[in-house]
Image: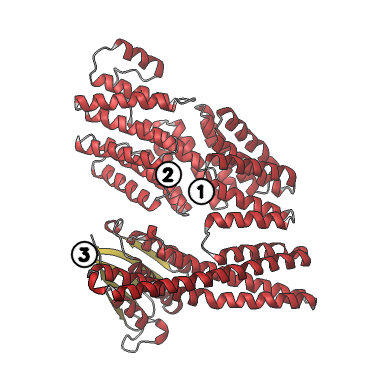
C-alpha cells in the first residue's frame, strides 16, 4: 500500500510556499513577524502581508497551531477587504484553504482555493500568481480524487504560463500533473511531468519540493516494477527530507522504502525502515502515519510467514483507521486481514473479514460475495484441504441460495410496485402533467433495461456456477482431483465474468458518471490494452469543452456500447496499424470519431458480425445518427453524431 496520501498533503504546502511570498520589508520568520505586528501600528497593506506570513508560519511549522492560524488569517481577510487589497485577500484565502487541506477538509479547501483564484482574476493579479492559484484548485480536486478535472486544471495553468511566458515555469504545476496521471494508473506519463518538475526545483534549489517529487518518482517506478530505480529515488528523497528536517515526509518515504524492499523479496531489510516511520508517527501523534506503518509491518511479517506479529500489527492498523473514520484504510486493512487469515489456514476468520470487506464495498451485489469466497477456495486448493474447502464451498452455496431467494423476492416486490405505479398512472393520467408522466415512463424503461441486463449478463453464468458447484461434491467423492481443479477454475472464470458484467452495469447507473468526460475515459481504459495487444498505434483525443457536460444514463449507456462494439470490430477484423478515437464538440452536437487504416470492407454489403445494424439502432434511439465510411483496403471511418445540452 503506497504512502502517497501524505505526499499530497506535503505537496500543497509546497504550492502555498510558491505563491505566498511577502514583500521585502515584512519579516518572514514567525518570531520576527510577531515583533513586527506589535510595533507596526498602522493597519496598511504591509500589515495584511505580515498577518498572512504569520498565518502561514503558524500552520506550516513542525507543531502546527491550526486554530490560531485560522484566527490570524480571518483578521487578514477582513482588513484586506476593507483596504480593497486584492493580493492580500487572495493570499489570505490561499492560506485558509491550506489549513482546510491539511486538516482533511477537502471540500472547504476547494471552496477557498476557488475564492483565491476568483479574487486574483478579478483584481488582475500577475499571470504567475493566477497560474499558481489554478494549480492550488487542482490540488484540492486531487484530494477529492477527481483526477480528470485535475488534469484539465493543470493543463489550463500550463497554457496560461505559455501564453504569458511565465519564467521560470511553475514546478508544482508539472508535479500536480504527474500525481494525477499516476493516480490514473499512467506511471510513464507521470514520470515525464515529474522529471520536468524536478528539473525546475533543482534550479530553484527547492530541497523540500525535490524530496516530494523524488518520492513520487519512486512510487511510479514501483508501479513499473523497476525496484532498483525506485529505491534510488526514495533514498534521494529521504536525504532531501532530512536536510530540511521534515519528519512527516521522512515517515512517508521510509514506508515506501520498506515496501520497495518487500517487493524486491528483501523482506527483513525493509523492517527497520518501516519501524523508523512508525517511531516518527508516534512522536508526531499522527494516527494516519502510524496506521500505515503498522499495516505495512504486518504485510512484511506475513511474507516472512511470521503470523503472530503480522496479525498484531494489522489489527493495530485497523483499530487506528477505525478511530480516524478513514473508509479507504478500513477497507484495505480489512482485506489485508482476510488474506492473512487465509494464509494461516484460519478459513473461518478469513471468511468473516472477507464478508466485512464486501459489505463495505458493495452491499447490493450478491455475486461479489460468492466470487470472493471462490477466490479463497482457489487460493488454497493446492494445500489439499479437501474437507475445509468442501465446508467453505457449502457455506458459500447456502449463502448464495439465500441471497438469490431474497433477490427474487425483492424483484417480485419491485415488479409489483412498478405495476402499481403504472396502474396509478393510468387512473390519474388526466390529473398529471405530461412531464411527470414522461418521467414515470422513463423510470419504467430504466428498470426494464436493468432487469434485462441482469438477466442477460448474470443469469446464465450464475446457473453455470450452481451446476458446477453441485458437480464438485460428486467429483470429490470419486477422488478425481484434476476434474475438481478444472471445475473450480471454471467457477472462478465465471465469477470474474459476472464481476465484469456487474461492474459495467453499476458504472452505467452510477450518477457520478453522468458526464461525457467519464464516458471518454471509460472507453479509453477499455480500448488501450486491446490496442496494445495488437500493436496498434492508438490516439485517443477528448475536447476539453466536453468536461462538465451532463448526459442521461440511457445516452451514456448507448454511447459506451456503440464505442465498445466499434472498438471490438476494429480489433477483430481491421488488421490496422493505426487507430484514432476522438470526442469533439461541434456547436450543440457531440461527434465521436473512430477511425483506422485497416483493410476496410464494402459498406454496400454489410456483414452481420460487425453489428452495424445494432449500433445504428442505438444511435437512432438516443436521437443521433451513425455514419460508416469504408472501402476495401481504404480503412474504416465511423462517425456518431448526437445532440448535447449546455
Colour scheme of this structure image? secondary structure
Residue farthest front in this picture: 427
**Front one among 248 and 217:** 248
Residue 272 image position (x, y, % from top left):
67, 36
- Per the image, the residue denoted by label 2 is 143
> Where 160 sits versus 582, above or below?
above
* Contact, mark 1 vs mark 2 (Cβ under 8 Å): no
> Helix or strand or loop: what does disc 1 sit on?
helix
From the image, state whether disc 3 or disc 1 is nearer to you: 3
Q: Residue visible at 33% across and 77% down?
A: 618
- Give the mark, 1 or 2, whose residue is nearer the N terminus: 2
**Badge 1: how crowded within 10 Å, few (<14), some, or many (20+)?**
many
Residue 154 shows which numbered tag? none
Q: Residue visible at 35% across and 41% down?
A: 110
> Where 425 sits versus 358, above or below?
below
> Helix or strand or loop: what does disc 2 sit on?
helix
**Front one among 361 and 641:** 361
From the image, state whether disc 1 or disc 2 is nearer to you: 2
**Badge 2: how crowded within 10 Å, few (<14), some, or many (20+)?**
many
* Contact, mark 3 vs mark 2 (Cβ under 8 Å): no
Residue farthest top in this picture: 39
**Front one among 607 and 229:** 607
* Residue 42 quadrant: top left
Q: How far apart are marks 3 and 1 (CA)?
A: 40 Å
- Per the image, the residue denoted by label 1 is 220
- Per the image, the residue denoted by label 3 is 588
Amino acid at each position: 500500500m503506497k504512502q502517497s496520501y501524505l505526499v499530497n498533503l506535503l505537496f500543497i504546502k509546497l504550492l502555498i510556499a510558491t505563491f505566498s511570498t511577502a514583500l521585502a520589508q515584512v519579516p518572514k520568520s514567525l518570531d520576527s513577524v510577531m515583533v513586527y505586528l506589535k510595533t507596526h501600528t498602522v493597519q496598511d497593506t504591509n500589515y495584511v502581508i505580515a498577518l498572512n506570513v504569520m498565518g502561514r508560519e503558524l500552520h506550516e511549522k513542525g507543531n502546527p497551531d491550526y486554530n490560531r492560524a485560522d484566527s490570524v488569517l480571518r483578521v487578514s481577510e477582513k482588513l484586506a477587504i476593507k483596504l480593497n487589497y486584492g493580493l492580500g485577500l487572495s493570499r489570505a484565502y490561499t492560506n485558509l484553504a491550506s489549513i482546510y487541506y491539511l486538516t482533511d477538509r477537502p471540500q472547504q479547501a476547494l471552496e477557498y482555493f476557488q475564492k483565491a483564484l476568483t479574487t486574483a482574476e478579478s483584481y488582475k493579479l500577475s499571470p504567475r500568481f493566477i497560474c499558481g492559484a489554478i494549480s492550488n484548485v487542482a490540488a484540492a480536486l486531487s484530494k477529492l480524487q477527481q483526477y480528470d478535472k485535475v488534469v484539465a486544471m493543470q493543463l489550463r495553468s500550463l497554457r496560461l504560463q505559455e501564453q504569458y511566458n511565465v519564467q521560470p515555469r511553475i514546478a508544482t504545476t508539472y508535479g500536480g500533473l504527474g500525481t494525477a496521471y499516476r493516480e490514473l494508473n499512467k506511471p510513464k506519463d507521470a514520470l515525464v511531468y515529474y522529471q520536468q518538475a524536478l528539473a525546475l526545483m533543482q534550479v530553484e534549489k527547492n530541497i523540500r519540493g525535490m524530496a516530494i517529487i523524488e518520492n513520487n518518482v519512486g512510487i511510479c517506478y514501483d508501479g513499473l516494477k523497476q525496484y532498483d530505480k525506485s529505491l534510488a529515488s526514495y533514498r534521494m528523497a529521504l536525504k532531501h527530507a532530512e536536510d530540511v528536517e521534515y519528519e512527516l515526509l521522512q515517515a512517508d518515504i521510509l514506508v515506501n522504502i520498506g515496501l520497495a524492499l518487500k517487493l524486491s523479496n528483501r523482506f527483513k531489510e525493509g523492517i527497520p525502515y518501516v519501524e523508523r516511520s512508525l517511531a516518527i508517527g508516534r512522536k508526531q501523534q499522527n494516527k494516519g502515519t502510524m496506521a500505515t506503518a503498522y499495516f505495512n509491518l504486518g504485510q512484511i511479517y506475513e511474507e516472512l510467514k511470521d503470523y503472530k506479529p503480522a496479525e498484531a500489527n494489522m489489527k493495530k492498523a485497523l483499530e487506528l483507521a477505525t478511530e480516524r473514520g478513514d473508509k479507504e484504510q478500513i477497507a484495505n486493512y480489512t482485506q489485508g486481514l482476510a488474506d492473512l487469515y487465509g494464509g494461516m489456514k484460519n478459513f473461518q476468520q478469513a471468511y468473516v473479514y472477507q464478508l466485512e470487506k464486501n459489505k463495505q464495498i458493495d452491499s447490493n451485489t450478491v455475486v461479489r460475495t460468492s466470487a470472493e469466497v471462490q477466490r479463497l477456495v482457489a487460493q488454497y486448493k493446492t494445500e489439499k484441504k479437501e474437507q475445509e474447502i468442501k465446508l467453505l464451498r457449502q457455506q458459500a452455496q447456502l449463502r448464495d441460495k439465500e441471497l438469490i431467494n431474497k433477490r427474487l423476492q425483492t424483484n417480485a416486490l419491485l415488479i409489483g410496485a412498478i405495476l402499481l405505479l403504472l396502474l396509478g398512472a393510468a387512473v390519474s393520467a388526466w390529473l398529471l402533467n405530461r412531464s411527470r408522466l414522461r418521467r414515470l415512463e422513463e423510470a419504467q424503461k430504466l428498470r426494464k433495461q436493468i432487469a434485462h441486463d441482469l438477466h442477460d449478463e448474470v443469469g446464465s453464468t450464475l446457473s453455470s456456477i450452481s451446476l458446477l458447484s453441485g458437480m464438485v461434491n460428486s467429483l470429490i467423492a470419486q477422488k478425481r482431483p484434476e476434474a475438481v481443479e478444472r471445475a473450480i477454475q471454471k467457477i472462478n472464470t465465471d465469477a470474474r465474468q459476472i464481476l465484469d458484467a456487474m461492474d459495467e452495469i453499476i458504472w452505467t447507473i452510477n450518477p457520478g458518471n453522468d458526464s461525457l468526460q467519464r464516458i471518454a475515459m471509460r472507453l479509453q481504459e477499455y480500448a488501450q490494452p486491446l490496442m496494445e495487444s495488437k500493436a496498434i498505434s492508438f490516439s485517443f483525443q477528448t475536447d476539453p469543452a466536453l468536461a462538465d457536460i451532463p448526459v442521461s444514463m440511457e445516452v451514456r449507456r448507448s454511447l459506451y456500447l456503440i464505442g465498445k462494439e466499434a472498438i471490438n470490430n476494429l480489433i477483430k477484423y481491421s488488421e490496422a496499424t493505426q487507430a484514432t478515437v476522438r470526442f469533439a464538440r461541434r456547436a450543440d452536437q457531440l461527434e465521436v470519431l473512430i477511425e483506422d487504416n485497416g483493410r476496410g470492407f464494402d459498406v454496400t454489403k454489410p456483414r452481420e458480425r460487425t453489428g452495424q445494424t445494432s449500433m445504428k439502432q442505438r444511435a437512432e434511439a438516443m436521437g443521433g445518427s451513425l455514419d460508416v465510411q469504408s472501402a476495401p483496403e481504404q480503412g474504416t471511418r465511423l462517425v456518431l453524431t448526437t445532440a448535447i445540452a449546455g
